[in-house]
Amino acid sequence: MRSQTDLERVLTARGVNLDTCSDRELMYALTAAVRQLQKPMDHARGQRKLYYFSAEFLVGRLLRANLINLGLLEEAERLLAAHGRSLAQVEDQEPEPSLGNGGLGRLAACFLDSIASLGLNGDGVGLNYHYGLFRQRLDTGRQTEEPDPWIGPESWLLDTGLSYQVDFGGFSLNARQYDLEIPGYENGVCNRLHLFDVERPAPPPAEGIRFDKTDIAGHLTAFLYPDDSDEAGRLLRVYQQYFMVSAGAQLLLRELEEAGHSLLELDRYAVVHINDTHPSMVIPELLRLLTSRGVELEQAMDLVERTCTYTNHTILSEALEKWPASYLEQVAPQLLPFIRALDQRARRRSDDPRTAIWDEHNVIHMAHMDIHSSAKVNGVAELHTEILKNTELHPFYVLYPEKFNNKTNGITFRRWLMSCNPALAGLITQAIGPEWQRDAGLLEKLLEHKEDTALLERLLAVKEENKGALARWLGSRGTEIDPHSVLDIQIKRLHQYKRQQMNALYAIWKYVQIKEGHTPPRPVTMVFGAKAAPAYTLAKDTIHLLLCLGKLIERDPQVSPWLKLVMVENYNVSAAERLVPACDISEQISLASKEASGTGNMKLMANGAVTLGTLDGANVEIARLVGEGNIYLFGRSADEVIALYRDNAYRSSDYWQKPELERLVDFILSPELLTIGDAGCLSRLYKDFIAKDYFMALLDLEDYIAVKERCLAEYEDRAAWSRKMLVNIARSGFFSSDRTIMEYNRDIWHLTPDGA
Ligand SMILES: *Cc1c(COP(=O)(O)O)cnc(C)c1O
């Protein structure tokens, strides 16, 4: 008789009947079984420990990812199949943790996976949001928001029973520590993500996502990035930040003391990574805790500067947080003397007022505090880091040239290829062996197969299969797409700098072309997935425009056989895992200089999509890796765009006045669209295009249309296209987050593995 496997044994012991239980029961049973198998695993060891502080960790569903890392995926699939069940169906029951919102949070999640997989001693520190950013609905022709609950009686969260008192101005709250386990890839290591929560979270709002923002005790961990268009919302964000870093700093010092280390050796035993500016208050909080335990202030400042490291994620000013000192006075008055001391120290180092922490308007600049008080500061792609050094953060670069360095972002190939695209992963393994699964750099071996027509044909066949699977999934949600059409995909947060509006104007152009009889060689499906921040009016108007265009095209019998525009509701990691493997054309069309890196571009490339984009963020590195013939580039360079801003030289009306562009922009207010859409929203968008267009959507539009048409034409040479796909996959290994984390460790964190 066949002996029972680990998984089977645990499930049997739990009394699960694999033949009769519901998919949901099976999902919970598998979750519990995986947790039980993770329990005896060891945390990575090492002298120095990393605490990765981040406001978001967009981890995605965990069942399949954890099974892969535990080496149990095949066993689980076999076991379920023997009982007529499938993991795909079971995992569909798993709620996706609402702990992040976009690229920054997804990066943090990939990093935790890589840290554990490389056996490095590091944990995440964040907040246990109950309702996420929001769940997006599009059924009314515009975006509406609802809470996105994910915590059930049997989620992946472990209640540690630990808590930390966090003192705010006038009251205190207990921060309860929950943990998510983060297993490494087949190495027996299991690290943690610590998530702090209030003791008595409030129930979800009765309607929408509006709630009492002054009820801190109940709502501190309700939503990620609560609406900050009023002061109560901004204060709530500061409460959240201080709650996270105070609890996290206390946890760190408790672990340091338990290990028997002196506070004076903080930097020897700990690294505090500040992921974007949200956790910046950890700096004064550590100073406060150290000095309250007897460390001299000057010495504490030296220690903290050697312990902290900071990643800058964006050059958009809205994300370089500044808080009025009065907010901190209200939320955490005990920090102000320490921030004052940091500011005075910064002023002793530089008399350039642009580098002040506490400015003359009584505003505190979080990024400035991070740079002065961190051992290292990094950007997230080569171009981004150069822009930081030469433009945005230049005065700091002059002061601390040795602190600045680049760490180009990455993705975990375990989730973004092995897990989401098993057919492609299998094909790659057949061609070059399995070693790439441990070292994505080895994907380069695929280049030896550039003339292997059998492999290239199977590459195309796998893409067709994945498109079919996407079509079935969308069909089950009420959206029909043609799996044999070209899939042109733009999935990312909705922001003007990402320029979804350009893609919308392309859809208008294509619609008009088809109306005029210029049909494309094969149907094109344009897919969008994007959430807009609830208070970001123009972003929501853009969603409205896209939905209207989708309807217009759908209703037009002359156009609909050739063009389709769909928006996938509630774009999140699970949706991305369906869309990425099926994509033909990866839209990466940000205004050059504005996208710090992007990681969606990397996921899509690794799955054999060809990029259509500007030379921005990591696209620059993608272009260099794949070479000219394997990417479609258009648009002005970052230098040109920076000069346009500097000289105030961009006038959108100059572009709108070109007849070809005017026609497209004016179509937004055409009778056809106005009968479908809301005149208020559409005219607001229209007016922005002609009067402002701050992110220059019209600047590159003609070039974009021309290059996109060339891309669609060249798609028809299927053999040549399959070679482009192969080169993209082969060169994507550089973007493994394992490579990124090895570089962080080599240049920034210096975590030594056990015993070294
Ligand atoms: C990867 C990812 C992102 C980031 O996409 P970009 O194109 O880099 O902005 C955002 N959201 C989700 C759900 C993702 O998986």
Image: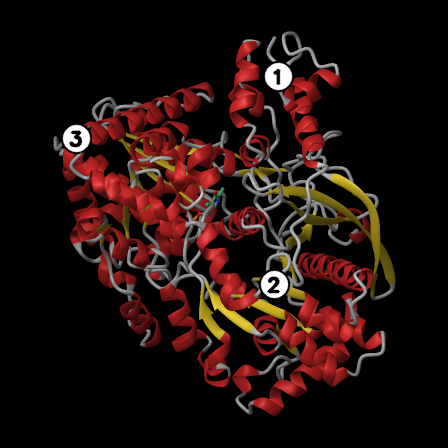
**Rendered location of residue 26, percent (x, y):** 65, 18
Q: Residues within 10 Å of mark 3 (few under 14, many from 20)?
A: few
- The type of residue carrying mark 2 is His
**Rendered location of residue 18, percent (x, y):** 64, 12
Name the element at disc 1.
Answer: helix
194, 75: nearer the viewer = 75
Q: Which residue is mark 3?
A: 453
Residue drawn at the location 22% of the way across and 55% of the way down = 634
Which comes sooner in the sequence, label 3 or label 2?
A: 2
619 horizontally vs 454: left or right? right
341, 690: nearer the viewer = 341
Dots 1 and 2: beta carbons under 8 Å? no
Which comes sooner in the sequence, label 1 or label 3?
A: 1
Would you say residue 313 is visible in this rendering?
no
Which of the 4 image quarters holds residue 60? top right
Which of the 4 image quarters holds residue 621? bottom left
Single out the mark in the foreground, 1 or 3.
3
625, 567: nearer the viewer = 625
Q: Which residue is mark 2?
A: 273
- Disc 3 to disc 2, C-alpha distance: 47 Å
- Disc 1 to disc 3, C-alpha distance: 41 Å
Dots 3 and 2: beta carbons under 8 Å? no
- The type of residue carrying mark 3 is Thr
Q: Is residue 464 above or below residue 325?
A: above
Single out the mark in the foreground, 3 or 2.
3
**Rendered location of residue 160, percent (x, y):** 80, 44
206 horizontally vs 744: left or right? right
Name the element at disc 2.
Answer: strand
- The type of residue carrying mark 1 is Asp
Q: Which residue is mark 1?
A: 23
